[in-house]
Image: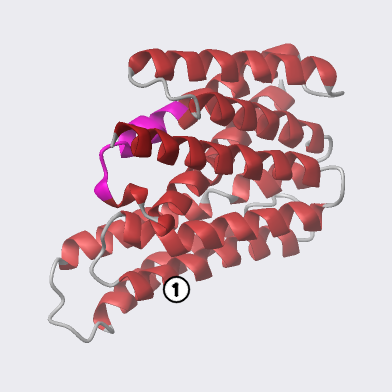
């Protein structure tokens, strides 16, 4: 059982690291490539999140999350000028409305109604957070920041794949993420060392926190739940990376 659990953790971490590495590589191609990677991350999360949380109407919840995720990516990508996030609050609001509609359309007796609604709305918040990655990529001088952040996220996730549990693993993931951000900042033009340290720390802390938070969820071992847990650090980190970028790039 411990071996199976270790393998599951390693697989999820490798998936997160691989997706983050692809996101970093997409920076060298185009903004459209970045949007495509984020759309795939959003869809993976949308499919797995309701099953990871064992929501009573997973099909409808997945549709709501998929629409919110794709709508977020499209809203930022299609925005012609800054501020790039100006249409994202509308997508978030519509996602919350659709979460209520999903409950109204349920054909059962609506058991666990509050749990289903809050779980779907929480998923909407997470999937909409991917907007931060694309918003920074479209900002002047922001593409190196995206590459640096995605690289730090990938390396921190790779370290989390080591079957080394508890708080020591948590601390190691945060430490390596911070170091990876600092090194990436030195190698890439644009982001300064301070920005690299901060964003590396944030990415490492996020990866470690998600793994520890979901470690005891039974449905985590299934394929849908594992995909959602793998996509979650990338999705959530979008808004955090955006906040760090705005603070450091403005100073």
Coordinates of residue 121 in the picture (x, y in percent): 35, 59
Q: Quadrant of the N terminus?
A: top left
Q: Is residue 39 visible?
A: yes
Judge from the rendering whether residue 28 lies leftward or rightward of residue 113; answer left or right. Answer: right
Q: Is residue 129 left or right of residue 110?
A: right
214 in the magenta segment: yes
Q: Quadrant of the C terminus?
A: top right
Q: Residues within 10 Å of mark 1 (few under 14, many from 20)?
A: some
Q: Residue 104 placed where, x, y %?
A: 25, 81
- Reply yes or no: does residue 182 show up in magenta: no
| In this view, 135 is above or below 54 | above
90 or 16, which lies in front? 16
**For residue 145, side relative to residue 102 (left or right):** right
Tell me the SS state at disc 1.
helix
Of residues 233 and 78, which is closer to you in this image?
233
- In this view of the protein, which residue sits in the foreground, 81 or 187? 187
Whether residue 129 is situated above or below residue 175 in the rendered picture: below
Q: Residue at x 49, y 27 (%)?
A: 160
Which quarter of the figure has residue 124?
Answer: bottom left
Query: What residue is pinned by disc 1?
Result: 63
Relative to 214, 112 lies left or right: left
- The picture places residue 36, in percent across and down from the top left corner, at 71, 59
Q: Is residue 200 above or below residue 147?
A: above
Give, as a single range, the part of the protein colored magenta: 208-218
Q: Tell me the residue at 84%/23% (across/down).
A: 188
Q: How many marks?
A: 1
* Residue 200 on image: x %, y %: 61, 21
Identity of the residue drawn at 74% across and 50% down: 82
Chief secondary structure of the magenta portion: helix
Q: Residue 145 appears in which quarter of the rendering?
A: top right
């Amino acid at each position: 059982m411990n071996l199976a659990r270790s393998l599951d953790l390693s697989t999820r971490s490798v998936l997160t690291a691989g997706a983050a590495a692809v996101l970093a590589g997409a920076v060298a191609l185009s903004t459209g490539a970045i949007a495509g990677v984020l759309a795939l991350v959003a869809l993976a999360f949308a499919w797995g999140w309701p099953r990871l949380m064992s929501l009573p109407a997973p099909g409808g919840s997945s549709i709501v999350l998929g629409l919110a995720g794709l709508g977020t990516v499209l809203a930022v990508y299609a925005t012609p000028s800054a501020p790039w996030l100006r249409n994202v609050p509308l997508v978030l609001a519509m996602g919350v409305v659709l979460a209520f509609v999903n409950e109204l359309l349920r054909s059962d007796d609506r058991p666990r109604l509050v749990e289903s609604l809050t779980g779907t709305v929480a998923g909407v918040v997470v999937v909409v957070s991917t907007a931060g990655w694309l918003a920074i990529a479209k900002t002047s001088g922001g593409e190196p920041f995206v590459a640096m952040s995605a690289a730090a996220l990938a390396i921190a996730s790779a370290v989390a794949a080591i079957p080394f549990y508890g708080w020591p693993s948590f601390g190691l993931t945060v430490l390596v993420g911070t170091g990876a951000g600092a090194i990436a900042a030195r190698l890439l033009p644009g982001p300064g060392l301070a920005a690299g340290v901060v964003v590396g720390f944030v990415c490492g802390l996020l990866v470690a926190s998600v793994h520890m938070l979901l470690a005891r969820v039974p449905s985590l071992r299934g394929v849908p739940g594992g995909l959602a847990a793998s996509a979650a650090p990338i999705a959530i980190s979008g808004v955090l990376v955006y906040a760090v970028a705005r603070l450091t790039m403005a100073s």
